[in-house]
Image (tube, coloured by chain):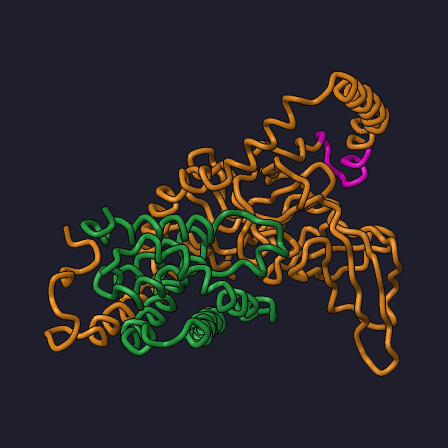
Amino acid sequence: MAVFGTDVDRPLYGRGPSAGLRFTVYAILSIALMYYDQHGHWVQRLHYALDATAYPVQVAVSSPRAAWNWLTENFRGRDELRAENHRLHDLVLALEMSVVRQDALEQENAELRGLRAALPPFIKQWRLAEIISVETDPLRQRVVINKGAADGVLVNQAVVDGSGVLGQVARVGPWSAEVILVTDPEHAIPVEVTRNSLRSIAVGSGSTGELLLPYLAVNSDIKSGDLLVSSGLGGVFPAGLPVARISGIRRENNQLLAQVRAQPLAHVEQDREVVLLQIEPSHPAAPAANPPIAPEAPPAAKPAPKIADPNE
Amino acid sequence: MSERHPRLVVLTTTIIALVLTVVPLPIWFAIVRPAFLVLTVLYWSIMTPRAGGLLLGYAGGLALDVFQGSLLGEHALALAFVTYLAIRLNLLMRAKPLFEQSLFVFAALMVYEFVLWVIDGWSGHALSTPARWVHALTGGLIWPLVVGILGRFRSSR
């Protein structure tokens, strides 16, 4: 078995392929892998297959936490459960009250928009997924969930929890998927202020619990406490999902842009389960028609671009 | 056992180190968490370069890429590079006192992180915080501990 090279019994120095040569080979191999992982397709398939082999280990690695959660769940006192039951009961009542006029309002809204039929339901399908591991790299705010391509998870699908947008699916494996959170420094979400429909973009700050709005002018009408919802632009998130609340604004006279911070509404740290949303595409709040190019889609599947014929 | 199966010991400790590297931790622990996998690979490359070696570094880095969802080959290249440095300097390092070894490990971890940083920049993940360099310091600090623990598994010759 030649696991670590066949050189165990040979002298280290003064023989054929030197460590330098072998390192060069490995370096070229790595660079080729990185290049094709970013641009090519077959390495992405390899990555997909490797994700499948990594999945059981990810589950095993996160199992102590899962076991602890299971224990605390199972050994909760009766009083505590009763209290929670009461609380949930009240919550259900409150929610029922708040949606009691929902159907009527939707119908009215459709009529105002000039649509004859009632709107299709906003959410086509939703699906619960469990967080199996949280990204270990402090620079990257990502989580891995236990639903993947086998469950119909798609790249760029919106991920929410009960109180707001968590993020979107960045990469799909066979049974798991990586979710990039709104707080990841590489993530940006188009938002709008509910109070005055002011639109902007909220980018992740890299720390849980903070979003930044770097593109707002000093004189823009925004206040602490304003609610930000997704604006539906950008083709990923549907319009109207709550995202964050403005937590702090700093305006300096010598600068063109205000420094605006917001606190995401989703509880990234406390969540164990997240919801994957699939939006009905014919609903007006669905993301705008130009979806981002999904890296997984084979090029043959793309429809040929239609060019409007001026003679028609 | 360890005398007859040096590769088995190396492989087992490396897998344990890999698990320690990817096990989810609260964010503050995650920042100061030393790169256990790099430390283990460095240890075996310095002490028994014939049983450890480049393939160990390369394969370990590739596994890390898969678990962390980074670009395939990124950690593999960085880890293979510092493994190469350790193999080249292994005779020199073995003769040094622990303190100087720690300094070398710190430098190697900085090089490792630097390679990752450069690749991150090239591949479009240009955002970075100073927190990413912290683990080099903690890694250098716990190196004597690594030597103490892994030394027990090493065949005494």
Task: Specify the chain shown as green.
Answer: B
Tell me residue B119's x, y (percent): 44, 71
- Relative to A154, residue B103 above or below: below
Q: Can residue A302 be seen by looking at this rendering? A: no
Q: Count numbered badges in the picture.
A: 0
Q: Residue furthest bottom?
A: A254
Q: Is residue A117 part of the magenta span, yes or no? A: yes
| A298 lies left or right of A113 | left
- Relative to A74, residue B58 above or below: below
| A278 lies left or right of B67 | right
In the rendered structure, which segment of residues is drawn in magenta?
A: A108-118
Judging depth in this view, the residue of A142 and B132 nearest the camera is: B132
Residue at left 45%, top 65%? B143
Residue at left 35%, top 63%? B43
Judging depth in this view, the residue of B82 and A221 nearest the camera is: B82
Task: Specify the chain shown as orange.
Answer: A
Judging depth in this view, the residue of A59 and A311 nearest the camera is: A59
Residue at left 67%, top 31%? A121
Tell me residue B98's x, y (percent): 42, 71
Judging depth in this view, the residue of A193 and B64 nearest the camera is: B64
Q: Quadrant of residue A272?
A: top right
Q: Can residue B93 be seen by looking at this rendering? A: yes
Tell me residue B146's x, y (percent): 43, 59
Q: Quadrant of residue B152?
A: bottom left
Tell me residue B6's x, y (percent): 23, 53
Q: Is residue A71 part of the magenta span, yes or no? A: no
Residue at left 35%, top 58%? B151
